[in-house]
Amino acid sequence: MRHFLTLKDFTKNEILEMITLAQQIKAQTKSKNFVPYMEKQTLGMIFEKSSTRTRVSFETGIYQLGGIGLFLSSNDIQLGRGEPMKDTARVISRMVDMVMIRTFEQSNIEEFAKYSKVPVVNGLTDSYHPVQLMTDYLTMLECGIEKPVVAYVGDGNNMTHSWLMLSAKLGFELRVATPKGYECDPQIVQEALNFAKESGANISFGYDPKEAVKGANVVTTDTWVSMGQEDEKEERLKAFEGFIVDSKLMSLTQKDSIFLHCLPAYRGYEVSEEVFEKHANEIFLEAENRLHAQKGIMVWLDRHRED
């Protein structure tokens, strides 16, 4: 059984197969040709963390593939009342055809997948956000970026970890700039660097946003205060001073560079209003592509399930 828990579990060819499927299904969708790749299948959607884009994109996506999405929050299932994750997995996976989970610890989704009888998709954990990176790569291709030189400016969080894995698997250049004390998880960094040796990816780390973005053709960032970090807001705002992606920083990039943000975006913090609005077309194309990238992932998993 193949699950989609982190990009490190896939080869370059497998990632590109999913992207190709996403492109094909998006083209069909735009032509109002809704091919029922997953006819009458049910996607169980477990949300321990709330989300706008994740719920709408998965629920719409499975519907467009001919199936139905079942929204389950912690208040709706026994998981929120203390039932072990492995028992929840054993029950739900006998009733649905695929499961998407948006949760906190990566270990939670890994335990669920271990006991699940159906494919499991990571809709976000504190360690990784792989569906977003498939979305971002699809968006880069649509924006004409075939040889990415990516600069990530901000917190060393689940988005950064996922960028590390995408770069390491596909072999493109990634430069990460974080404030001191907010670096990526050292274990994830080492795993990515090991994969990078095989793919030829050039991954570098530093503390200077200007050095990171110089000559890049893709700049990306994320919120400085993620869910569950609200108590650290003032401390984080002070630590991230100088890390805002503004016009001055973007002027150091290649002429036709793009800016990506997984949203929600907080103008005046991680990105300026001017940069956000200048690159709004790219950002909202990226938001739309969550729908299509995730359909590609689901169809690929469905085709690779055990009989």
Image (tube, helix red, strand yellow):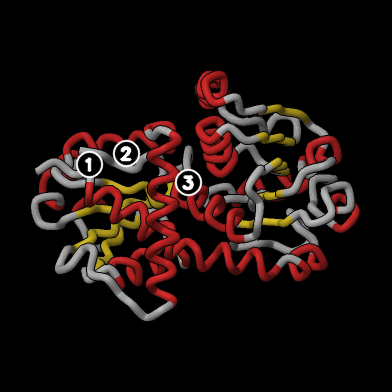
Q: Give the structural element (helix, strand or loop) at label 3.
A: loop
- Give the amino acid at mark 2: Asn
**Position of residue 144 measured from the top left corner of the image (x, y, whole percent):** 65, 56
- Give the amino acid at mark 1: Met
Nearer to me, 111 or 225: 111
Nearer to me, 219 or 104: 219
Q: CA distance from mark 1 to mark 3?
A: 20 Å
Q: Give the structural element (helix, strand or loop) at label 2.
A: helix
Q: Is residue 15 left or right of residue 98?
A: right
Mark on residue 85?
Answer: 1
Indicate the quadrant containing the C terminus: top left, top right, bottom left or bottom right: top left
Earlier residue among tags 2 and 1 = 1
Q: Residue at x 34, y 67 (%)?
A: 61
Q: Is residue 252 left or right of residue 1?
A: right
Q: How many other residues sit within 10 Å of disc 3, few (<14), some (14-19) or many (≥20)?
A: many
User: Could you tell me if the residues under marks 2 and 1 are in contact, i.e. CB atoms within 8 Å?
Assistant: yes
Q: Residue at x 41, y 37 (%)?
A: 13
Eyeballing the image, is 225 above or below 50? Answer: above
Q: Residue at x 74, y 48 (%)?
A: 217
User: Could you tell me if the residues under marks 1 and 3 are in contact, i.e. CB atoms within 8 Å?
Assistant: no
Eyeballing the image, is 23 above or below 81? Answer: below
Q: Quadrant of residue 22?
A: bottom left
Q: Give the structural element (helix, strand or loop) at label 1.
A: helix
**Position of residue 174 measured from the top left corner of the image (x, y, whole percent):** 67, 35
Residue under pointer 3? 129
Indicate the quadrant containing the N terminus: top left, top right, bottom left or bottom right: top left
- Give the amino acid at mark 3: His
Residue under pointer 2? 108
Mark on residue 158?
Answer: none
**Position of residue 303 measured from the top left corner of the image (x, y, whole percent):** 22, 49
Q: Residue at x 18, y 63 (%)?
A: 42
Q: How many other residues sit within 10 Å of disc 1, few (<14), some (14-19) or many (≥20)?
A: some
